[in-house]
Amino acid sequence: MPARPSSPAPAPAPTPVSVLGLGMMGSALASAFLRAGHPVTVWNRSPAKTGPLVAQGALPAATPADAVAASPLVVLCLLTNDNVDEVLDGLDGGAVAGKTLVNLTNGTPEQARALSARATALGARYVDGGIMAVPQMIASPAAYVLYSGDEEAYETHRSTLAVLGGTRWTGTDPGLAALYDLGLLTGMYGMFTGVVQALALVRTENIGAEEYAELLVPWMTAMLGGVPEIARAVDSGSHLTDVSSLAVSQAAFPNFLSTFRAQGVSTELFEPFQALLDRAVEEGYAGDGASRMVELLIKR
Ligand code: NDP
């Protein structure tokens, strides 16, 4: 039977949303809710940042309490979770009762669990989130947000939250979105660690960084293709490899460190990797692939 074209998802009913925190990211979130037709109330510690959002149709709130009172759905996007705690400190006990707090501030799993417990004790429903986008990507198909915590609250507001980008549920443990988020950012920072080291190395011979990036990007992209195989080995616990063993990497790695030194480039980012390779071989894993290092890194 031919597949029937699916009808477009119905537009979500307008839901009042309050956005607390109008930095680069919070402003992008508030703007996306406005463009999707939701009534938006905004609060920011420095009131001047409400101006552009008010010009787009948002209502300014003078205090966090006024912002929380204005909407059933309250999105927080402050610099740190300490700031979120401070905002909660300043609210009357009952101010958040019955509200859904969606905290998209970057933080740790422990902070998310503590905030969830605090919000729940105040009678609110708590959803934590991790934004996988820069502000310019918000509301584009490339953006998505990881969520965890109160699943019923998440489902109630999912269609409204979906205007920010894709929605990805990670589980009822409120700390999971932060864990997924930090894991993805760990991959990103690891990648950038290699990028800055490689560019520093070639710059010592006056090779243009842009010119070199033309080689670096396809190389790194090709290497990323090996990640599913590493992941399969991690899940299966079978680390023997016929691709590239830890012994081969350990033998080659001193060439990197000595070349960095000879070229006048710091080794501070890469010495720990040499130490881990040395430990892997010492502990008897010379024939294993990179997946073995995952186990060696886990301390508990
Ligand atoms: P900004 O520095 O642009 O904005 C920080 C916001 O936090 C401002 O609204 C600021 O208020 C507020 N703030 C800081 N300290 C306090 C405080 N003590 N009390 C109340 N409010 C405070 O950061 P972003 O908007 O870029 O980032 C916000 C969050 O989003 C961060 O957790 C970040 O990690 C996360 N994020 C950001 C991404 C990005 O690409 N920008 C990507 C993914 C996540 P004020 O204006 O008064 O200083």
Image (cartoon, rainbow, N blue to C red):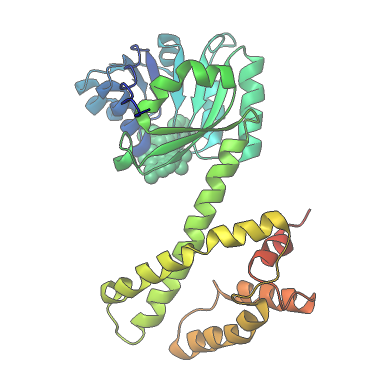
x and y percentages locating residue 75 in the rendered image: 44, 24
Please report the residue visible at 54 percent of the width from the left and 13 percent of the height from the top. Answer: 96
Outermost residue on the front side: it is 1
Eyeballing the image, is 44 above or below 213? above
Eyeballing the image, is 291 above or below 95? below
Relative placement, left or right, of 154 versus 112 is left
User: Quadrant for ligand 1?
Assistant: top left
In which quadrant of the rendered image does the N terminus lie?
A: top left
x and y percentages locating residue 6 in the rendered image: 33, 24
| Residue 245 in view (yes/no) | yes
Eyeballing the image, is 221 above or below 81? below
Outermost residue on the bottom side: it is 262
Relative placement, left or right, of 14 versus 231 is left
Please report the residue visible at 70 percent of the width from the left and 78 percent of the height from the top. Answer: 278
Quadrant hosting residue 3: top left
x and y percentages locating residue 59 in the rendered image: 29, 15
86 vs 52, nearest the viewer: 52
Quadrant hosting residue 171: top right
Please report the residue visible at 50 percent of the width from the left and 40 percent of the height from the top. Answer: 106
| Residue 44 in view (yes/no) | no
Please report the residue visible at 34 percent of the width from the left and 17 percent of the height from the top. Answer: 41
Relative placement, left or right, of 156 versus 3 is right
x and y percentages locating residue 76 in the rendered image: 46, 27
166 vs 228, nearest the viewer: 228
